[in-house]
Image (tube, rainbow, N blue to C red):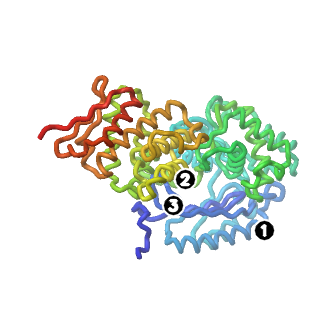
Amino acid sequence: MPKVAQGRLKVGQPVAIIDIGSNSVRLVAYEGLTRSPTPVFNEKALCGLGRGVLSTGLLPRDGMEKAYEALRRFRVLCTVMEIENIQVIATAAPRDAKNGPEFLAECSRIIGQKVELISGKREAELSALGVACSIHAADGLVADLGGGSLELIGVKDREMGQGVTLPIGVLSLLDRSEGNLKKAQKIIRKELDHLPQLKAARGKSIYAVGGTWRSLARLHMKQRGYPLQVMHNYVIPVRDAADFTALIERVSTETIDSIDVVSAARRPLVAYGALILEEMIRKCKPAEIVISAHGVREGLLFERLEPKTLDEDPLIVAASDLNILRSRSPRHCEEIVQWTDAFMASTNIIETTEERRLRHAACLLADIGWRAHPDYRGEQSLNIIANASFIGVDHPGRLFIALAVAYRHMGLSDDEVSPRLRELATSRMLDRARILGAAMRVSYLLTAAMPGVLPRTPVLCVKDDLELRLPADLGPLAGERLFNRLRSLARVIGRKPVLTVAER
């Protein structure tokens, strides 16, 4: 048997990031240094290193021991995974504690290499880079909330502003307020007062990074019965966020419905995260709250990429990777991209740049479910795409891709698609997904998923007709089933189907 799974990409050696934070110590191993990094292993230990640092000036001894234990385990795991490229960083708590140097020296000894202690400025910039490179056309304020500090920095695409670090991480805030939420609220208001970063982000997005805010978002998802489980790019409308944070502050965390989705160790901190978010909303008046699962660790990966690689579209890279791993013929899926380019241009249907890139991603993913039973290929493809760890796409966008591929397998009926899922997409998106799904249904019946046929069989609108002209050697394909699929495609774009075969 091969040592390495056939489902792994040849993207160089795996890399690992170990992040020693104020609340958790985490190991994330990635398949390689790519524009769309795929984690192959992810584990954390909640050590609470930032607990009591502001009041005592020292890292807690029990937290240090938990961190040492985690690092010993992480070193063994990296050896098992044969990862030599390991980057280890530490943030706020070791930075602020008097016994931080002693702690970091022991961490370096355990892990076998020097731990990089990053400044608050660098932490903010790395977090902004992680967000900018994983959220398409990001424009707003990155807010990275950890145990020891809160970093705020403006971002627009990959341009970033001046960052600021504030001593109001959830553990430091718990410490400073002595567990009193009203006192914590006063501290937050004072720290956030007159910050230019908040004023500059007015009317834009707040990109929330950090475990506490992810816990808040997970709870929000559960309470509203959200149909996806993907955290990255989850959007909470501002009014909803304000009402939800007020609820979290008002009642005991343990009494909240669905609190079981938040780990017991994090529950006492959720209210402090809610307080900070509520005050930021009040001062910033943002357009929306966007949860980012990417931050400092991914920023570390992205800053190591060549500029040419960094300019690649991460969604298309991820779709191309899955195409290579799971399609019968990756080249065939690439041909569908070009085939639908010509088809869409002939329809005169207006397509935005964003809609075009989503269509391209859907074409690349069109055949990833072929190994499933035919009756379940649509359902399986929809679930894989809707919940995949893609970056560079929002939730409505990923649903468009998922629905287009589902329609390609199941036909254009919505009977097998959850109404809750369809609610995430606009009417325009649903219409475009049906058009693309119908087009792909024609393409696969023409080609049996093999390359070389689509360039010879364009489907184009000519005046009021939708024409498919087959070369003579492919004439036997011109049966009733192919015509029925052509007719379905013609129907959704308001054309008359025409199927002809060239004479020999």
Residue at mark 2 to residue at mark 1: CA–CA distance: 30 Å
Taking the view exactly as shown, the residue that stands out farthest to the bottom is: 1
Residue at label 2? 298
Name the mark nearer the viewer: 2 or 1: 2
Classed neighbour count for the residue bearing mark 1: other residues with Cα under 10 Å, few (<14), some (14–19), many (≥20)? few
Residue nearest the viewer, comparing 429 with 81: 429
Q: Would residue 185 appear left or right of 469 to someone viewing this image?
A: right
Q: What residue is drawn where x is 33% and y is 37%?
A: 486
Classed neighbour count for the residue bearing mark 2: other residues with Cα under 10 Å, few (<14), some (14–19), many (≥20)? many
Which quadrant does the N terminus fall into? Answer: bottom left
Residue at mark 3 to residue at mark 2: CA–CA distance: 10 Å
Q: Earlier in the sequence, mark 2 or mark 1?
A: 1
Q: Would residue 341 appear left or right of 92 to someone viewing this image?
A: left
Number of on-image labels: 3
Question: Residue 312's x, y, as percent?
Answer: 42, 46
Residue nearest the viewer, comparing 494 with 15: 494
Residue at label 3? 30
Residue at label 1? 61
Helix, strand, or loop for circle 1?
Answer: helix
Residue at mark 3 to residue at mark 1: CA–CA distance: 31 Å
Question: Residue 451's x, y, as percent?
Answer: 28, 50
Q: Give the residue type at disc 3.
A: Tyr
Helix, strand, or loop for circle 2?
Answer: helix
Above or below for 20 versus 444: below
Question: Residue 435's x, y, as percent?
Answer: 42, 35
Q: Earlier in the sequence, mark 3 or mark 1?
A: 3
Q: What residue is drawn where x is 42% and y is 30%?
A: 351
Q: Give the residue type at disc 2.
A: Glu
